Image: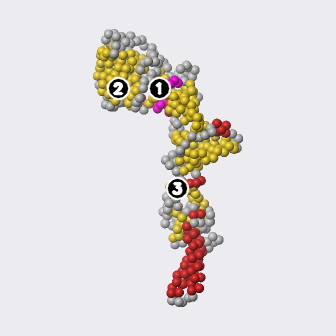
């Protein structure tokens, strides 16, 4: 795949240019092929009939390794002079070539780089080319680009869907949330729990959560309830021994047996009843509460020694794999999207999470307005099995519709704010950059539409724009410039 900026004609396969640098007039030719870049920067010495310079070989925006081959002049398709590539430092290969019969031969390379065989025509070299300086371009040495991690890509058409942007908040899913309350009056007793779990603690089914020591007597006394059960149990066991010796009547035995069974059923029902949100275990009169499912503690009201009454809240536990997303959007914008096919969650300056229609589902769409009169609330269920979102997390949301527009788009990282303008860097040749103001449209999936200021096929910097911005602060840009 070839790309060119300011090429001599639409048929050319390279970028050509020249500039002045510390007394040197450097000419440039660049060839891009997918993940490879072959960039030649050289000087022309017309009197001696030669050029000398360096070939920079990049692979995935870093110096290519294991490079071998030649760089040569072609005249009428025939190689007339060549220089074998010998590494000066990683990715850099000095060369020297001599003009022969033609004053405008083609510079070409034949290399093997990182196991890939490439033959590329970089472009024509005019022996008597005149130097003209372009003040709008900033130079940055290729080796410095490698160190700074600067990357680039072609501006191309992409599908940017219709979206609306709105603030949002992550909530628990009521279907995967439960509250644990105190089953009895008493006070929190850590007992044999080394550390009482706090908010944010992940728990598994069967984990100890709290111990409650009931008072001897109260309106909802567990101690009295427990004592009645053990008293009935002891009376029944004694009746069993007595009836074996015919010491009591069958009727009296049956009365004690029924009393015991009633007390036992009530005791076991209390311990196994999940209405309080936890399993209960009786250990020597202290009630230990255990989680009955995996989850994360959202709230904890448990403090050792605290007095509680039956029904007081102790914990709330939710499943972080299943969450809700509450979005508060403008009513008129929400009305435009009749269907939601995905969402982009923006959780930080550079952090974005994309959910497709399989991972996010509409729960409710409230057409009523909030107090402002201009916003409506939408609730989505979210598959958070990869733990990308946190409960109560504030987020910005881009809701995706089912319609899209084919527009020129660049990665979000290619853009930065300069005062009130959106700016990006267009890459000319291998080491020259133009700072350019553009007009932007919608954004989604890490890409932003460019509505004005950029053409398809131009190469833009996708990573490292801000360091370039700092290094080229003296380069003036004109928002009225025609491109």
| Secondary element at image label 3 | strand
**CA distance separating discs 3 and 2:** 56 Å
Q: Residue 29: where, in percent of width, then height?
A: 40, 20
On screen, 395 above or below 108?
A: below
Say which residue appears at 44% left-offset and 18% top-offset: 11
Tell me if I can see residue 392 in this picture: no
Foreground residue, 82 or 415? Answer: 82
Image mark for residue 101: none
Dot 3 or dot 2, earlier in sequence: 2
Q: Are marks 3 and 2 in contact (CB under 8 Å)?
A: no
Label 1: few (<14), some or many (≥20) within 10 Å? Answer: many
Instruction: Provide the residue designation for mark 1.
Output: 459
Instruction: Provide the residue designation for mark 2.
Output: 118
Foreground residue, 307 or 408? Answer: 408
The mark lying in front, picked from 2 and 1, is: 2
Q: Residue 43: where, in percent of width, then height?
A: 37, 16
Q: Residue 229: where, in percent of width, then height?
A: 57, 76
Q: Quadrant of residue 269?
A: bottom right
Image mark for residue 295: 3
Q: Is residue 456 magenta?
A: yes
Dot 1 or dot 3, earlier in sequence: 3
Dot 2 or dot 1, earlier in sequence: 2
Q: Which residues are magenta?
A: 454-466
């Amino acid at each position: 795949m070839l790309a060119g900026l300011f090429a001599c004609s639409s048929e050319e396969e390279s970028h050509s240019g020249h500039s002045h640098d510390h007394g040197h007039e450097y000419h440039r030719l660049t060839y891009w092929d997918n993940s490879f870049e072959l960039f030649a920067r050289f000087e022309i010495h017309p009197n001696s009939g030669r050029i000398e310079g360096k070939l920079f070989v990049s692979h995935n925006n870093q110096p290519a390794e294991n490079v071998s081959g030649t760089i040569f002049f072609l005249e009428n398709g025939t190689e007339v002079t060549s220089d074998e590539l010998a590494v000066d430092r990683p990715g850099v290969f000095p060369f020297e070539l001599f003009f022969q019969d033609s004053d405008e031969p083609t510079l070409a390379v034949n290399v093997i780089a990182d196991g890939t065989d490439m033959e590329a025509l970089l472009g024509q070299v005019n022996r008597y080319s005149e130097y003209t300086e372009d003040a709008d371009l900033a130079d940055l040495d290729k080796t410095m680009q490698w160190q700074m991690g600067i990357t680039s890509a072609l501006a191309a058409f992409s599908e940017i869907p219709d979206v609306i942007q709105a603030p949002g908040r992550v909530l628990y899913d009521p279907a995967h949330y439960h509250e644990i309350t105190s089953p009895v009056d008493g006070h929190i007793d850590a007992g044999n729990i080394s550390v009482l779990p706090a908010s944010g603690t992940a728990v598994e089914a069967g984990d100890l959560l709290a111990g409650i020591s009931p008072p001897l007597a109260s309106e909802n006394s567990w101690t009295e309830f427990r004592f009645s059960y053990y008293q009935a149990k002891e009376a029944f066991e004694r009746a069993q021994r007595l009836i074996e010796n015919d010491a009591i009547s069958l009727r009296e035995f049956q009365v004690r047996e029924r009393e015991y069974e009633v007390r036992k059923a009530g005791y076991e029902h209390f311990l196994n009843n999940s209405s309080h949100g936890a399993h209960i275990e009786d250990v020597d009169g202290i009630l230990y509460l255990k989680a009955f499912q995996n989850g994360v503690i959202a709230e904890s009201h448990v403090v050792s020694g605290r007095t509680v009454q039956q029904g007081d809240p102790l914990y709330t536990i939710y499943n972080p794999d299943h969450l809700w997303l509450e979005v508060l959007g403008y009513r008129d914008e929400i009305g435009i999207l009749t269907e939601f096919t995905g969402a982009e969650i923006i959780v930080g300056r550079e952090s974005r999470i994309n959910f497709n229609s399989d991972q996010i589902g509409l729960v409710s769409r409230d057409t009523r307005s909030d107090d402002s009169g201009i916003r409506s609330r939408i609730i989505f269920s979210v598959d958070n099995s990869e733990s990308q979102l946190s409960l109560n997390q504030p987020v910005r949301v881009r809701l995706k519709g089912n319609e899209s527009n084919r527009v020129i788009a660049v990665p979000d990282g290619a853009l930065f704010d300069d005062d009130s303008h959106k700016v990006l860097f267009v890459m000319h040749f291998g080491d020259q950059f133009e700072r350019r103001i553009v007009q932007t449209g919608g954004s989604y999936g890490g890409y932003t539409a460019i509505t004005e200021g950029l053409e398809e096929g131009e190469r833009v910097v996708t990573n490292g724009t801000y360091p370039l911005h700092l290094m080229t602060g003296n380069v003036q840009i004109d928002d009225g410039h025609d491109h």
